[in-house]
């Protein structure tokens, strides 16, 4: 059997002191000052499911990491997931006829339309997201939404020119149907001396 030669003053691995590894901690910054800075000049502010901020301006979206660093820029209308929280939205993003047709195909009893989100969300397991192009994407996520953004699908109502209707457009409004077009899917509604195009399925007869 060969013997290991031991040199005076030589250290073995067992003689080395054990170093305690420091735990790697993810530090999240207080993003409230960033939100306050952009709140009045942005179209929407979104907190992603992993803690970053998306600040949407007129022509671009600023990406702030969870540590509060403006890392890069994205295009406008960045797609969102159900777990992303819309903190602030200055404008409504209208849905498309294709999306409403997909809601019918899925025979959904309810859907979520968040202000500032172009997607329609069908709650359930899994959660289904209908994009503006009609693509259906499934997520295993809890949806972040406000109570008034959950819509219940009622039986189809019949509308005609002259009907007084209730609809949502940056708030709840009452107006009169001036014209119906787009194969009966869209109505032009007059309210407060304004003309607004509204999807028929988002109208409710004013009783």
Image: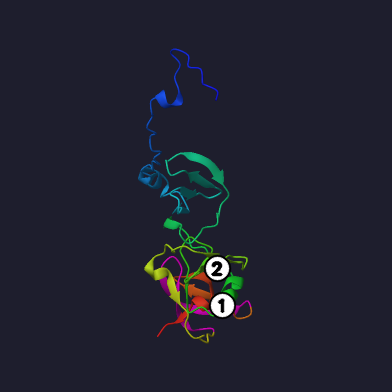
Q: Is residue 179 magenta?
A: yes
- Tell me where residue 37 sits by quadrant: top left
Residue 144, position in %: x, y? 42, 62
Which mark, residue 95?
Answer: 2
Q: CA distance from mark 2 to mark 1?
A: 16 Å
Helix, strand or loop for disc 1: helix
Can residue 16 be seen?
no
Asked if the residue under mark 1 is in contact with the one under mark 2, i.e. CB atoms within 8 Å, the reply is no
Q: Mark 2 or 1, which is nearer the eye?
A: 1
Residue 7, position in %: x, y? 48, 14
Residue 54, position in %: x, y? 48, 49
Magenta span covers which residues?
Answer: 161-182
Q: Residue furthest top?
A: 8
Of residues 49 and 18, the one nearer the viewer is 18
* Crowd tier of the residue under label 2, counting other residues whose Cα lies within 10 Å: few below 14, some 14–19, many 20 or above: some
Image quarter of the N terminus: top right
Residue beneath the point at 48% across and 84% down: 163
Image quarter of the C terminus: bottom left
Q: Which residue is mark 1?
A: 106
Helix, strand or loop for disc 2: loop
* Crowd tier of the residue under label 1, counting other residues whose Cα lies within 10 Å: few below 14, some 14–19, many 20 or above: few
Q: Looking at the picture, does residue 18 appear above or below residue 200? A: above
Left or right: 22 with respect to 185?
A: left
Residue 43, position in %: x, y? 48, 54
Residue beneath the point at 51% across and 79% down: 177
Of residues 204 and 110, the one nearer the viewer is 110
Residue beneath the point at 42% across and 82% down: 206
Q: Earlier in the sequence, mark 2 or mark 1?
A: 2
């Amino acid at each position: 059997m060969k013997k290991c030669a031991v040199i005076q003053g030589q250290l073995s691995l067992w003689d080395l002191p054990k170093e305690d590894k420091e735990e790697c901690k993810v530090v999240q910054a207080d993003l409230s000052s960033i939100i306050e800075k952009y709140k009045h000049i942005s179209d929407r502010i979104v907190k992603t499911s992993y803690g970053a901020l998306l600040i949407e301006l007129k022509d671009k979206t600023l990406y702030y990491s969870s540590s509060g660093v403006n890392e890069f820029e994205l295009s406008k209308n960045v797609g969102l997931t159900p777990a992303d929280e819309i903190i602030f939205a200055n404008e409504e993003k209208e849905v498309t006829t294709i999306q409403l047709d997909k809601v019918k195909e899925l025979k959904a009893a309810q859907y979520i339309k968040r202000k500032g989100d172009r997607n329609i969300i069908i709650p359930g397991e899994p959660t289904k997201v209908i994009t503006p192009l009609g693509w259906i994407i499934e997520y295993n996520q809890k949806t972040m939404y406000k109570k008034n953004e959950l819509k219940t699908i009622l039986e189809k109502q019949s509308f005609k020119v002259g009907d007084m209707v209730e609809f949502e457009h940056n708030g709840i409004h009452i107006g009169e149907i001036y014209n119906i077009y787009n194969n009966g899917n869209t109505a032009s509604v007059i309210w407060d001396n304004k003309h607004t195009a509204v999807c028929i399925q988002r109208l409710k007869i004013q009783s």
